[in-house]
Image: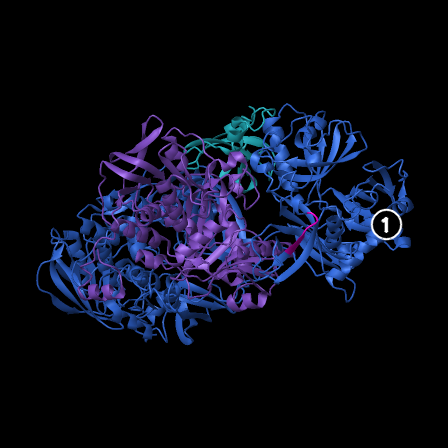
Amino acid sequence: MARYSSLAILRNALSGNQQWTPAWRKAAPKPGYDVVIVGGGGHGLATAYYLAKEHGITNVAVLEKGWLGSGNIGRNTTIVRSNYLLPGNTPFYEHSMKLWEGLSHDLNYNVMFSQRSIINLFHTPAQEDDHARRGNSMILQGVDARFVRPPELKRRMPGLNVDGPSRFPILGGLEQPRAGTARHDAVAWGYARAADQRGVDIIENCEVTGFVREGDQVVGVETSRGRIHARKVGVAVAGATSHVLKTAGLNALPIESHVLQAFVSESLKPCLDCVVTFGGGHLYVSQSDKGSLVFGGDIDGYNSYAQRGNLPVVEDVMSELVELFPAFAKVRLLRSWGGIMDMSMDGSPIITTGPLPGMYLNTGWCYGGFKATPASGWCFAHTIAKDEPHAFNAPYSLDRFYRGYVIDEKGQGATPWKH
Amino acid sequence: MSGYRLAKSGGQIDRSETIGFTIDGRQYFGFKGDTLASAMMANGISIVGRSFKYHRPRGLFAAGTEEPNALFTVLRNGSREPNVRATEIEVYEGLQVESQNRWPSLSFDLMAINQLAGKTLAAGFYYKTFMGPVLGPLKGTRFWMFCEHFIRRAAGLGRAGIEPDTSRYERMNAFCDELVVGGGSAGINKAMDAAKSGKRVIICEQSAHALSPDQEEALGKKGITVLTRTTVWGWYDGNVMAAVERVTDHLEKPAAEKPRHRHWVIRAEHVSLCTGALERPIVFPGNDRPGIMLASAADAYTSQFGAIPGKRIAIFTNNDSAYATAARLSSAGAKIATIIDVRAAPSDAARTLAGKAGAKLLSGHAVIRTHGGSRLKSIDIAPFDVSMNRPSGASDTTECDTLLVAGGWSPVVHLASQKGAKPVWSEELQAFCAAAANADWSIHGAAAGDFDFGSNLSKNPAPVFQINHPGKAFVDFQHDVTADDVRLAHREGFIAVEHLKRYTTLGMATDQGKTSNIPGLAIMADALGKPIPDVGTTRFRAPFTAVSIGSIAAERFGDLLPERLTPMHERHKELGARMYEAGLWLRPESYNQPGETVEQAYVREARAVRAKVGLVDVSTLGKIDVQGPDSAEFLNRIYTNGFAKLPIGKARYGLMLREDGFALDDGTTWRLGENHFLMTTTTANAANVMQHMEKKLAVHWPDLRVHLTSVTDQWAGVAVAGPKSRDVLAACVNGTTVDNDTLPFMGIVQGEIDGIPVMICRLSFSGELAFEVYCGAHHGQAMWDALMLAGQPWNITPYGLEALGTLRIEKGHVTGAEIDGRTTARDLHLDWMLSSKKTFIGSAMMDREGLTDESRWTLVGVKSANGEKLKGGSHIVASENADNPGRSLGHVTAICYSPELKTYVALALLENGKSHIGKRLFTTDPVRTGSHVPVDIVSHHMVDPDGGRMHA
Amino acid sequence: MRINCPYCGLRDLAEFTYHGDADHALERPEPAQENSSAWNSWVYDRSNNAGQHRELWQHTGGCRGFMIVTRDTVTHEIISVEKVGS
């Protein structure tokens, strides 16, 4: 398969773009694999890619129920950051950031990772101290962070309500300059293409309906396209984890599924050059390369598998957006959608061996799955290949809840809809 | 005016009233009732927009919400509204609009150079390049970011403003039995029928004039609420419908009391969708030249506005409806030169109409190419074979300045799709219809595929969606997605409908694919050799058409959240307090005297408390009235320490855990009677604690006879603290004494201050002899005044949050900064409060290994060793080297200057805190100040550890 | 979404607070059991059903009463609302 480059584009343009080939093969399932990954989303595809690249395991299939990338990789607000507070989280997300920084080259696919920075605004002295605490935590763990004051905020975001009357006057912001956004679909397609090139079978329209067991051991999966044997089965099905694991007899897990809405405005000329979050509520907003404002807020806050949100949250998010940018009142909302988040009981993810022998689980990403995609795949591949977690994901065990080693960035306890 | 306005026809305009408006500063005229689009057409303006990617010149394509090309920025009162469709802008005197996405002007756009890149800019080209070098200054993401800078500037449509929007937006809640969406004939009939059966009916029509004044009146007479210029854009669960009414956008001088937009939230028992159908185009090479538009659009411009799109019109169709259009246009005075029909044998009725229109009929033909620059000049027509779906012979050129395209009709099922109705393919319509409705809703008229309903629509179009012939044939006009792009997506395996959409951006522009989705699917189906419904559909999402963000924010625009003020708020302001936001509350931070810094103020205030006496407003503390025979038992389960045996007239400090064993909140609870307690919570946690306890009673302990009432707003509270506090109270309290016998530590008495009934509890957050005095909220200000007056002899000092914080830090009392949802009772040295004689919430889970691990961060005191200021948010490290501080051992939770210890101090959570006591560590703040201060780790009880003062 | 509060009638979603899986919440283990698997599972594990889900809601913006709402988590259709304990 041809490498992508500007030369290739030119050459193909001259031949009327007739020579391009499929980005990945439409593979049919073989009877068995060394590893089967359930879930053709970002994390599943990344896992397959790193299994092949880092561990030389290429007899791998990725099984996707619908079309590739149809889960949360296809419906998120594309933010990439590693600005965490707690020591259990920072090394993992920073590893992810480093993988992001080389990802387009690594995959030979432009995922449009734009390190345009994220700024978390704060509005009271107490919030300022909280942000300092987080920023200091980042710096002490080798992550970039800096404080931004109102004059600079005003310069960089001319529409930001820095001077005007506000319920939440802006005192400053905590910035992570290396943070940014990426083209979410391209991440799925890039991993798929790169995994495919290394021999991974990507099988779409193949729904897993059960697990094949020999005693306790998981030795394969039942699918809508027949039984597929596997020495190891990794499950990375954000938004459907409970549903899929029920088919293996696991009826309860430390996660709940909730709907998170996201929004885009009509296309605008560049007016916002970074990702910015509001400290007086729950809002994050950036502007895509096409010019749309891409923004979101809190989850709707009740169990849901429906990719549809409700109106009060829409009203909250719009109110907060115009609180920050009063001129955006005249910008128009173009589209909204809902994605299903597997919210864990402490707001942090799970990447682990088990819970059954032969099974490996990757879940609980709450809002944060997109930015984690590279490290999640990298760590999950390590965990599957070595049968033990890497140091980066060792804190993300399943038994941490029961043992009391929760990683609770928001301090909300086992109330998943509050994380 | 130019020759594009007919002498007659045009039911919507008033020729007696000429309206002046400007486009890019140039003056034009139209009539009252014109849209910007119809006025531009009447003025002979052919280029109305530039496309997104190639900056190709584009003309009007539609007459309604489906218009993809004519987008303008409306300038008004110094603010900008970008991307407004000209078909929806009603002209008013002085209207100013600006064209978009062009430089320097619409008719001459240098960015059109992008067209030269032609085929290199095919779908997906971004993904295949811009990766940049592996080494050098543009390695990593830098090369892409360098390119992105220019790509972003070329992309985007209108420019948003910077100046705040000064418009007002309004929210309206409405309820009805029947909501009718769409004011066409189906909608009117439906509304009338519902009103006849006694239902409360609302009918919404998105356009301004679809309903005639007579129709509006007739509906109004039946008691029907008629909302025009109102788009129902969202269908939420439980038939909660979101709509936006454009109240004043069309007015030259809106009345001051009128909002710009009104956000309607309509709860409807039943929704009737009468949303009609939209005409779709046929895709063919060169189909985007200005002068090519939907036949239905020309029909609308002529009949409603008396404007004709051109002088010599050709029509390209695959169905009968275009013939009626031709006849109507012709009778209105337009010249119809040719009708090109892909079908070999149009019906006799069609032939008759063609004859009536005086048009030459070319059946079994198709348009395969077009010519022209700023306006269409001619078209190439070739024989066409429907069964092969390919041109089948040599072409001929025909001159025309306008080509109307009629590709069949698609029911508007967007809202039904939002509701969850699956789209069902109709062979008869060659379009998707909504699947069966249910008790919540129904669908009628053209939206239901019922085209016989007095409409000009036709069924049974030939299944021709595209003319597959070389040349740029546009599917999505705004995003410049061509038929070749769709075929390229197919070639590269992006064949799932969502992949097609995402890879090519088909249907993602501001028109959301209203005219491009079906042709796009058809081209993919053709490439796959599958029927269209097998390619699939995407789900429509809210909003139906783009809706102003300000309208959805409505009354919260500029007023996001309420402010909670204590009864003494005015007094704080009079005393010069700087106010501080604590959740919704505004609280005094410090009472700065002239020239004082915050630090000088709080140090003075804290000193005054320790030396004599101060008072602080504590009305914001959560207060919950607990009553009922089982109240004591209830509190005994809620708190970790015992409350069952608390005597009447005494208070106790209590700690609550969550079920998972971590600390939840603390506060004092006062026993006012055998079955009556008053609980206080921290300000921040008041609502959480209330819900937590309500849930326990409702769900887990329904047998307990307890009633909870939030009384936070009913009581005003003041803490009087300092060695002279008892003297102050003695000087003003009647009805009780306040000496140590009557009012011992944690005792409660009732009395009066200046005739105001008060309840006094002797408890101390500051560590001094102190009292909390509560009265009814309405008396709060008077009580404050009385205490200030009584305290004058001791120079009583009001103190704010900063001084309150200083006093409690010195004393080592915890607040929300330490009870942060991650700490345990042991972490905070509150294990003495964990009763071993009973079970309580959290007792089962609090001893897990993770909660008792020696390495946990626990509470310590921190003293600046060299008198240097400590910084909030600092972490604690072992290294004195600020540039290489090593790992974090913990962080400070609260800092202050301690007047007692004469240095800066802090409370901190520190890894295995006890093991560091007596040691020298460093606080570090690299992110903010770079401060790196040597500190001594001490016990968190930094002042008066024995409690002698508060027990005095 | 609208919920038919058994005490107040049909009210808007914005007036209610969610409290999670009701069947789960009602099965609180005996407090005397220390850190047993029953407690672990009660505090942390959820069935997270796709389809019918019985859940606790509180009418915080109204009567503050608790109710069990049976709702389809795939469609958001509310099947029934009952008082807790009824």
Image-quadrant location for residue B660: top right
Q: Give the residue at the far left of this rendering.
A: B393
Camera-nearest residue between B155 and B389: B155
Q: Which tint is chain C? A: cyan
Q: Which chain is purple?
A: A
Residue found at x 35% / y 53%: A187
Q: Is residue B152 visible?
A: no
Across and down, in percent, residue A311 comes to 48, 46
Q: Is residue B507 visible?
A: yes
Across and down, in percent, residue B608 comes to 83, 55
Instruction: Tell me the magenta residue range.
Output: B917-922
Residue found at x 78% / y 66%: B594
Q: Which chain is blue?
A: B
Q: Is residue B918 magenta?
A: yes
Amino acid type, callout 1 = Ala
Question: What residue is shown with label 1?
Answer: B786
